[in-house]
Each structure stands twice: as C-alpha cells, then as structure tokens.
Amino acid sequence: MIRPAEKDLHVLKYFSSVITVSEAKVIHVTEPSLRYCPLACHFFQEFEKADPTDIRSLRDAIQKAIESKIRNYGFFTKNRSFHFPKRVVPYGASEMLAASLKNRFIETAVVVCDGAGTVITGSSETVQGIGARMNTLIFTSPIKEILEKLKAAGCHVVFENTARINPMEGVEKAISLGYKKIGVTVAGFAAEQLEQIRRLEKEGGVSIVILAVCTSGIPHNKVEMIRRRADLVWACASSEIREQIGNTAILQLSKQIPVYALTFQGVAFVASCSEDPSLFNTLDIKKQYLISNEPGDRAVHLWNSQTYIQETVLPANSPKTPSYETKNKERALV
C-alpha cells in the first residue's frame, strides 16, 4: 500500500545552489557560487541573460530553470513525465545507462527519482525518463502518482513509503532480486558508499558499474574515494576532479564537462554505447584517449552521433568550462 507523505518536500542542487521545492513551487534558493555553466546556458536562456556578477540575477535564473522543469515535465508533482525518447545530454549518465541496458551490457540500473527515491529498473526507456533533465537530488518525499507510474513500468521502488535515497542499499536489493550485472549512479556527496558497493560486488559475485555523478563542490576526501572506487566519473564543475582524476583516466568523453572512464570496466561500459564496441578492443591500455566532436584518428558512433577518438594526454580541457567565483567557494559546497 502506498501511503501519502506527511509533507511534500524535495531538495536538490543545481548551478551550485540548494533549491527547495514543495507543492509544485520553488520555495527557497540559496546563493550560488557558480558563475557560468555551458550546459545551463544551452538549456535555459535565463542563464544567457543573467549577469554573472549579480547574485540576484543568477538566483532568478536558477528559480526559473527549476520552475520550467516543474511546468514542462512535471518534476516533483503527480504530472511527472517519463517520456524522453531522444538523447537529452551528450554523454549523460542516463543516456549511457539506457544504451548499456538496451545492448545488455548491464541487466538493471539503480538510480534516483524525485517522488520515489531509490529505484531499480531494467528498462532503458524508464532510465532515460527518470534521469533526463534530472539534477542532483538530495532529498525527496513519496508522490503516489509517480510511484504508481514507476511500478506500472516494472520498476522496483526500494523505499516506497519514505522515498529514501540510498544507492548502496539499492544495489543490495538488486543483488537479492537476482541481478548479476548492475549499473548504479552515486552522487559525489555520497562517495563513502562506493567502498560498501564494491564489497557487495565481491561478496555477491556480481559485476557492478559505478557511475559517480553530481560532483560539483565535493571535498578532497570524497574525490579520492571516487578515484579509487568508481568506474566512471562526471567532472561537472569540479576542478579537483579534472586535476586529480582526469590525469589518471584511460578515456575522456567531451571537453567542456568531461566524463572520465577510470577502469577497463568503465571503458567497456562506454563501448557498450557504441555501434561498434569492438573498436575499443584495439585501444592500448598504456595510453590515454579522448572522444569528442573534434576530428580525430577514428570515427566512433555513439548514440547515433558521429564522434572521434584520438590518443592524447589527459585531462583534455576546454576554455568553456563551468567557473566559480573563487576556488575556495567551490570547495565549500557540499
């Protein structure tokens, strides 16, 4: 039985601000320390118009961006849409999970959804529907209609009555359900769970691909946890991820907001999203590679788009990366 939540409350992080949503309204936005993000500018005109030196202007842009998600896609409401048939974010985690599920590299994915919390699904369409346009979800409360939609789509909601967010317990439940090849997204602020997930992998005799996402502003110790235990990591707006993890990566996807494959399993996961996975078998494991839209040595078809792979020294940076007011403010974000 699905019990209604005592309080409709959802907390997320976007553009370095913590945003609180209740009853389909943005009720609070904290002061952002981020000043520029190419992805935000791509999706929302408000950021193109905002004055990066004016905090009020940026907060207004952030609020309007979240309000548009509520209005257009039903985020945090009973009207939540899970229909995102097209690739939304180049090299996005949900896009990669969806492709990997479709090509059967993994059997199921453990992800986070507003109004439901921790969700287990083997549907590529549902993974894309949950994750497309999703931002860092910190807290959410159950929404009856969202739970019903997910269950009708064959999903297993791990904490149906509370919508709790806990990827490690989600993986534990997926193993108990009999899954052997699992993909899981873990937000950077929960990086301490990576060690526990690896222990579950070993004890359960299963294969787990860990995608470390939403890493903006995480402290140094959590960057190190990601470096040691994740298969892929999204750099987001973290200069520490670029500087301390990027140079150890085997493969980098994109330059503006890089995704780093840190392990051979991470590279194999990327290969599963390609129309020609065998191409990745020819890579020299002692070298580093970049996949981007810039013409390179060989063409690689990812998500029906032609990109190129080239040998290079990582990290490969772009001048159009997210920028903070100060590096100290970046590190202060949690």
Image (cartoon, helix red, strand yellow):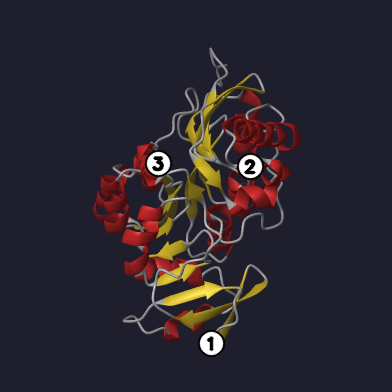
- Can you tell which mark lies on residue 153? 2
- Disc 3, SS: helix
Amino acid at the residue labelled 3? Pro
Q: Nearer the viewer, residue 309 or 127?
A: 309
- Disc 1, SS: loop
Mark 3 or 1: in front is 1
Residue 264 spot, x, y in % from top left = 36, 71
Residue 52 spot, x, y in % from top left = 59, 42
Label 1 packing within 10 angstroms: few (<14), some (14-19), many (20+):
few
Q: Nearer the viewer, residue 6 or 88?
A: 88
Q: Do callouts 3 and 1 mark residues in contact (Cβ within 8 Å)?
A: no
The mark that comes first in sequence, 1 or 2, is 2
Q: Is residue 269 left or right of residue 8?
A: left
Q: Is residue 48 left or right of residue 155?
A: right
Q: Quadrant of the N terminus?
A: top right
- Residue linked to disc 3: 167
The residue depicted at 73 percent of the width and 45 percent of the height is: 45
Mark 3 or 2: in front is 3
For this orientation, the residue located farthest to the right is 72
- Disc 2, SS: loop
Whether 202 is drawn above or below 7: the answer is below
Label 2 packing within 10 angstroms: few (<14), some (14-19), many (20+):
some
Q: CA distance from mark 1 to mark 2?
A: 42 Å
- Residue linked to disc 1: 297
